[in-house]
């Protein structure tokens, strides 16, 4: 079912948690709400669920205004980070709970409830464990019971609040893949909250990046990673470097020299240059480049990470190179140039060095030759 | 040798453990239990075993004794049930709501622990006597509380109150709000959430409180004798009958009644303990 969030605002005793958030979610989509803690992602999820009520704004399920309905009437499935299973009930009773509490007119017969619960347990690969109690299951198994329980009511939308947050890394990866499979098979409209960008980018059809109670960017994992629209998204998703530069007649200058990057049609003035560590090329004979002293060098899996000191109190820059190219670079000066980069103009008022949301964004990506 | 027998699971008296002092702790525990509990009780059993079966049966089946035992266990049971219901409600209010005077009420729950039971008995008698504040209101309705078994129940409810509240309260505080939210998202209304999700989770703690209140009620003496009226066959409790027999120097009868009380209490507490162990095993001890 489609979910539309329109101009939602939420305050907790005068403290604004969400400000004017709008979001359209298509039927059958798998959406990730991604952001640091305190960004309002869980609040948004709980508002959709009906566990909180908005201060202003409306939420539509299809054509129906859901914001006036209670949690019970919304028919959603909610999965909590810490499972929230009913520990005095068997796995089977947990899964069938949602059907058993329905009023008699809408409740399927007992045999049908049992059959559906067993089918779901089969789907989440827990067949044979239906007589166990939650205390007798591992964390990953408990979360799968919680998911089966949420899906048993045939929810309009499935909501997951950091579903894998309490699990260890190995189980988390496994469940991630498995959740994607389940989603592809059942086609529930699904929204999940996470602070793990890897999880969001790997799992979701679209990612909603949130910060400070507002949506920064909505897009596919590719769009989010390759075309971040704000310094926040650039900094939050993946690794990135930022440098304070100046623009003069279409040429980008770092300190007192041009670095060989052109930004035509840009007015002169100060700006911030963003680029990813792996989007760089080494240059022999610097006729317009960035240059720095290698201060640290680490081998990480298939690449070598170099930390560069560009001098004069600039923050250290990190670049990633194939190991063979970087082998000779230890403790020497190397010259490089970003191949993919982006420029964000500062707002009119001079800002503190930390990137703030109102920095004006300019789409100026150029892929190096 | 020890390695040989490792295939058969041999019961080991001492498990290897990093926690020190097992021997000392067990020694102290056993010595203490023997001094305080086991020696007095075995004295009682030894004494009553000197009676011989036929005399013992005759003494325990004496109508006055049977009546006293029935009243003791019956009123203690009713009082424990009342305490279970209202103790859970009271704990719920103390855990879930914030209101002025909450701390005072919380502290008042423990008063029956501290108050001399005789004082409680006299106070309750004064209130519930036909000319007392509450008794005079109930009198026109034809309800008599003081000097009837109902009065015994009132006294036992009073002394047993803290047990249920204090055992259920910490468990209730641990209830995860998410569990209630989960029930709500699955479509359960408030009543279903309470009856199907919250109360079953409190069952083990509630049973513990019930058992404690019940045990206390069976043995209660001080507060009951003031309000009961102590009419033989009507409102005479077993502990009082024991005292009466002792004052008559009828030690045989006193020990016989005591032995039966001991046996009955032990059986009931054992059953309740087994129910608890069973439910603990199912739900797991951790939250």
Image (cartoon, rainbow, N blue to C red):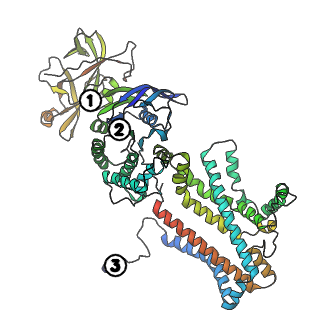
The lab-note entry on whether marks 1 and 2 share a chain reads: yes
A107 vs B262: above or below? above
Cα–Cα gap, marks 1 and 2 = 21 Å
Q: Is residue B110 visible?
A: yes
Residue B265 is situated, as x and y percent measured from the top left of the image, at 63, 74
Q: Which residue is mark 1?
A: A225
Residue B104 is situated, as x and y percent measured from the top left of the image, at 70, 48
A319 vs B256: above or below? above
Q: Which residue is mark 3?
A: B8
Residue B118 is situated, as x and y percent measured from the top left of the image, at 79, 65
Q: Which residue is mark 2?
A: A190
Task: Estimate how packed mark 3 is, as few (under 14), some (14 to 19) or many (20 or more) residues with alpha carbons within 10 Å.
Answer: few
Task: Estimate how packed mark 2 is, as few (under 14), some (14 to 19) or many (20 or more) residues with alpha carbons within 10 Å.
Answer: many
Q: Which of the two residues, B146 or B11, is positioned nearer the viewer here?
A: B146
Circles 1 and 2, Cβ within 8 Å, touching? The answer is no
B199 vs B180: above or below? below
């Amino acid at each position: 079912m489609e979910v539309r969030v329109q101009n939602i605002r939420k305050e907790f005793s005068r403290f604004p948690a969400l400000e004017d958030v709008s979001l359209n979610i298509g039927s059958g989509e798998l959406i990730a709400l991604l952001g640091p803690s305190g960004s309002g992602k869980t609040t948004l999820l709980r508002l959709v669920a009906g566990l909180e009520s908005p201060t202003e704004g409306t939420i539509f399920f299809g054509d129906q205004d859901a914001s006036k309905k209670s949690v019970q009437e919304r028919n959603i499935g909610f999965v909590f980070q810490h499972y929230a299973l009913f520990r005095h009930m068997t796995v089977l009773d947990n899964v069938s709970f949602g059907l058993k509490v329905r009023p008699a007119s809408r409740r399927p017969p007992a045999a049908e409830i049992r059959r559906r619960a067993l089918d779901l347990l089969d789907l989440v690969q827990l067949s044979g464990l239906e007589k166990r109690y939650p205390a007798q299951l591992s964390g990953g198994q408990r979360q799968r019971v919680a998911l089966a329980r949420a899906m048993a009511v045939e929810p309009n939308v499935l909501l997951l609040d950091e579903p894998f947050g309490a699990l260890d890394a190995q189980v988390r990866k496994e469940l991630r893949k498995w959740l994607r499979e389940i989603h592809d098979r059942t086609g529930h409209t699904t929204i999940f909250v996470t602070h793990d960008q890897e999880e969001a980018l790997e799992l979701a059809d679209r990612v909603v990046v949130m910060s400070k109670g507002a949506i920064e960017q909505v897009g596919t994992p590719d769009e989010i990673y390759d075309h971040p629209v704000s310094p926040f998204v650039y900094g939050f998703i993946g690794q990135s470097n930022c440098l304070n530069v100046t623009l003069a007649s279409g040429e980008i200058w770092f300190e007192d020299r041009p670095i060989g990057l052109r930004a035509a049609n840009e007015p002169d003035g100060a700006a911030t240059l963003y680029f990813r560590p792996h989007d760089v090329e080494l240059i022999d004979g610097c006729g317009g480049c960035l240059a720095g002293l290698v201060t640290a060098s680490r081998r990480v899996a298939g690449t070598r990470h170099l930390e560069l000191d560009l001098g004069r109190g600039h923050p250290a820059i990190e670049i990633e190179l194939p190991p063979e190219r970087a082998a000779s670079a230890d403790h020497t000066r190397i010259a490089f140039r970003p191949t993919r980069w982006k420029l964000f103009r500062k707002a009119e008022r001079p800002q503190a060095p930390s990137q703030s949301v109102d920095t004006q964004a300019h789409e100026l990506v150029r892929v190096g030759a | 040798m020890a390695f040989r027998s490792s295939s058969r699971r041999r019961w080991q008296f001492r498990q290897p453990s990093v926690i020190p002092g097992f021997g000392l702790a067990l020694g102290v525990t056993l010595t203490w239990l023997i001094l305080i509990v086991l020696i007095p009780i075995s004295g009682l059993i030894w004494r009553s075993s000197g009676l011989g079966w036929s005399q013992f049966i005759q003494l325990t089946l004496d109508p006055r004794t049977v009546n006293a035992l029935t009243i003791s266990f019956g009123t203690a049971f009713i009082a424990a049930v009342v305490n279970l219901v209202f103790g859970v409600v009271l704990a719920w209010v103390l855990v879930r709501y914030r209101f002025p005077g909450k701390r005072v009420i919380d502290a008042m729950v423990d008063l029956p622990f501290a108050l001399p039971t005789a004082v409680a008995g006299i106070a309750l008698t004064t209130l519930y006597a036909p000319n007392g504040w509450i008794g005079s209101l109930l009198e026109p309705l034809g309800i008599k509380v003081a000097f009837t078994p109902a009065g015994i129940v009132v006294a036992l409810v009073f002394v047993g109150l803290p047990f249920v509240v204090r055992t259920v309260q910490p468990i209730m505080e641990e209830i995860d709000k998410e569990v209630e939210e989960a029930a709500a998202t699955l479509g359960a209304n408030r009543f279903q959430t309470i009856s199907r999700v919250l109360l079953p989770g409190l069952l083990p703690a509630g049973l513990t409180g019930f058992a404690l209140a019940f045990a206390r009620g069976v043995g209660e003496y001080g507060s009951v004798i003031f309000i009961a009226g102590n009419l033989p066959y009507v409102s005479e409790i077993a502990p009082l009958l024991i005292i009466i027999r002792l004052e008559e120097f009828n030690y045989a009868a006193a020990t016989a009644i005591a032995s039966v009380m001991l046996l009955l209490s032990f059986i009931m507490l054992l059953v309740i303990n087994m129910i608890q162990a069973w439910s603990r095993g199912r739900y797991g001890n951790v939250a």
